Amino acid sequence: MTDNNDTNASGASGGPDDRVIGTPSSAEGETIVSGADEPRREHAGPYPAEETHKHSEEEQRRAEKTAAVWFLIAFLAGIGFFVAYFAWGPNAEGEQAIADPQIAQYSNMALGGTLALALFGIGAGMTVWARRIMPHYEVSSPYDELPSSPEEKGSFSEFFMKSADESGFTKRPLLRRTLLLSMVPLGLAPIVLLRDTGPLPGDKLKKTLWEDGTRMVVEGTNQLIKASDLAEDGSMVTAFPEYPHNEEHPHGLSLNDQAKTVIMLIKIPEGDFKPGMSEQQMNWTHDGIIAYSKICTHVGCPAALYERGSHRILCPCHQSTFDATDGAKVVFGPAHRPLPQLPIGVDDEGYLIAKGDFSSAVGPTFWDAEKGD
Amino acid sequence: MSTDSQAPKALRGVGNFIDDRFHLAKTGEKNLRKVFPNHWSFMLGEIALYSFIILLVTGVFLTLWFKPSMQEIVYDGPYERLNGVLMSEAYASTLHIDFGVRGGFLVRQIHHWAALIFVASLVVHMLRVFFTGAFRKPREINWLIGVGIFTLAMIEGLFGYSLPDDLPSGMGVRILQGVMLALPLVGTYVSMFLFGGEFPGEDIISRLYMLHILLIPGILLALIAAHFMILWHQKHTQYPGTGRTNKKVVGTPMFPGFAVKAGGFFFFVFAVTVGLSAFVQINPIHLFGPFTPTSITSGLQPDWYMGFMEGSLRIFPNWLDFQIFGYAVPIGVLVPGLVVPGLIFGGLGAWPFIERWITGDHRAHNVADRPRNAPVRTGVGVAGIVFYGLLWLAGSNDILSHTFSISLYWTTYFFRVAVIVGPIIGFIVAKRICLGLQRRDRETLEHGYESGTIQQLPSGEFIEVHKESSADTVHVLESKEEVDRIDAETISSIEAATDANGVEAPAARGLKGRLRAKLAHWYTKDNVSFEGVEAHTGHHLHHGAAEEKEPAQTH
């Protein structure tokens, strides 16, 4: 292809007046590029190129005015930006402060609108400048020949090897090997130093705060839950273990523990449990109330959507669907493990309690999640 | 435009001061004269560069107030609706940027919009480079750097999205942690070390902050600098046209033409980003509320560039999950979380080398291919776009299901099939279109273009007058390189020429050789040959030209 073009170019330009048929003359504003073998027309600029689109003085003057108008608009918009900045204060003492979401919105629009206009004005002015004042021409320059000449390569390689030999690195293996050996521990150091970024997993991911006798509270209100609170069929409550709010734990349950202990208590109507439920799983329910971990076993979003009619639990992130009447088995979607079930019962006072920890590891499935259950 | 105007004295002073110390006059002139070929598609990479600059500037501003701390506090600040709510300091400080700092809301919006535009322009820029074969020798290394920038940009974006610690951003981190946990053997360790314990812990925001504002931008900056130095050194590719050859680049000089145009374009990109930030609000974290691991809303969507990951996590079934000695291997998380992005990024990175291996083309290319002239590559690219696009759509299947009242499960079934069938159809269709376009090119080259003028010949026959294409068009049409059909026999025959004994050629022997021969055949079997086609020699043209009494010109 390269050759083709070259032949065409040289073949077509026998003399200055010999235009390639079909190409417009340079006066028509089309770009013609000078090649080594093409005639060059005079160009006032510093380039050996054909100037193909020089604008008339009058046109340049008009363009100058247009560009100037844009720059003035940009200037005024820039001033407007400062006005907008000082128009609405940051604190709530004044009446019009950006703390008010509505005012924040106005402020955002005013600041952004003026800034955008200022930037646009500069861009537009520069474009007018480039397109209608500056002459339009194209120039050419050769691509570099990429591989070096054999002489250069040879010289380089000779010098390199000579110097390498001179250094003794190639000839003295003891030096070379011990140097490399000395690097190994240092290379590993950054990895070792990361050891204290976190604790070893151990069985942390498999244990939660739930234990026999832990009472449960409603998420948000922290009210203790009685079995009678879930009397209505199909009712669902999100719950945590009861946890003290005191000086040591001013905010109650930590987010880490919330992420592991959160459960859904669901009241399943009598007879709706599937026969596939094992006896143990049924024993872990109380009066039709069953407790599952709310954290999806896929990648850990809260499986928060419970559909009363079908008793299905759906995770809104990736749509894993679990059947609440069948031990939270996966009926659709990417999750594999059922939601862990929490054994529950009631204590003497009628409050719902856990009767142990979850049936399996909570949350996203990990390497040893199902080991040793 | 006179050449005899002298530089102002002050400028000369500065110039001389610098030159006295660096001897830069010659280098400086050479670089000011640097040639930039003109084409709209060369501005895509510029958009990426400019968005990156905007990201750096706005990011620095945001760090003045943002507190990367997961310390839990009870909010008492300017945004009254959340007063009394428990939240992390990171979230509270983001609220402060939005409602306590003038222009803070705007800058945060600009930062987020610029990030979306940055990744988008990277993608489109890469597609341009891919489809025009601009990644070919000698530019493979710059292509790899580009793939690196793209990958890091995505991670950088994900981490930035996570910092405000609002509900969707925390959920993004949760999903990231879920994918990490799925790693066989090391998953729990990686997660524990990254989070400083269990999820969410108290370290992740400050660690992501360090990665987001220091480490990754630092690497990105270095890669972008390398990208530009290589581009500067090797010069741009260019599209075919008069005078544009593999040996000579044609375009606007750096100074003054390109500098002013590019400067203007920077302001346009900035203006559009700011305009969007002013009037199209995204990521209103004050409406989402702080992160808690137990709450979620439906219809949650990540930033667009993470959509394909979300989609692949959604549609990949759990059928392949298995256990080995009781240890879980959740393929349903590993494949979407690691294999799919690995395929996309790995495939992008490997393609120049795969293509070179298949075609055996070891020449340097400076003139870009027209996509139609590389039908298999274009087909593969389209297949990739379809694959990515379907995964991306699958990432909003709940929204699609809701908007179009389709069963959610059926959208999933559809996407499961479509991500496999779609790319195949996309490949075939794109390749056929390319071949059709090649045929039309050959037709145009030989017969000129249809002028739209109908003439009646003395014989009563009606013809449409074809006119000669311009020289530039002819150059473009003739830019199609002749493709030799490569098959096992071709490879053998090349080798056999030197092998008098007729032994099967070494290049075609062995498993690898056979595979290569098969792929080469697949790559080159369909080709519209332009061999022997001379411009404007077809009979249509002579008809028309003769009638118009124009001399038929050939060259």
Image: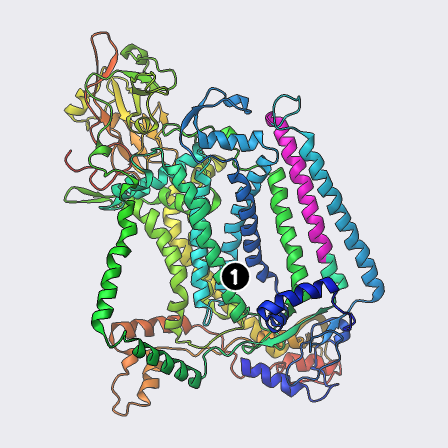
Residue A73 vs A21, above or below: the answer is above
Which of B27 and B77 lies nearest the eye of the viewer? B27
Coloring basis for residues: rainbow
Which of B399 and B452 lies nearest the eye of the viewer? B399
Which of B160 and B176 lies nearest the eye of the viewer? B160
Question: Is B78 contained in the magenta span?
Answer: no
Which residue is situated farthest in the top direction here? A349
Where does residue A307 sit, x and y in percent of width and height? 36, 25
**Which span of residues is magenta-colored?**
A99-127
The quarter of the displayed image where residue B40 is located: bottom right
Question: Is A124 contained in the magenta span?
Answer: yes
Which residue is situated farthest in the bottom direction here? B500
Q: Is residue B131 visible?
A: yes
Left-right relation of B340 to B245: left
Q: Is residue B380 visible?
A: no
The quarter of the displayed image where residue B165 is located: top left
Which of B398 and A102 lies nearest the eye of the viewer? A102
- Indicate the amino acid at tag 1: Arg
Residue of label 1: B128
Is disc 1 surrounded by few (<14), some (14 to 19) or many (20+) residues within 10 Å?
some
| Numbered disc 1: secondary structure | helix
Mark 1, chain letter?
B
Left-right relation of B459 to B233: right
Residue at 38%, 77% (x, y): give it: B486
Where does residue A94 sit, x and y in percent of width and height? 66, 22
Left-right relation of A344 to A75: left
Residue at 69%, 39% (x, y): give it: A81
Where does residue B450 sit, x and y in percent of width and height? 66, 71
Residue B503 vs B245, above or below: the answer is below
Where does residue A240 sit, x and y in percent of width and height? 31, 21
Residue at 25%, 64% (x, y): give it: A180
Quadrant location of the C terminus of chain A?
Answer: top left
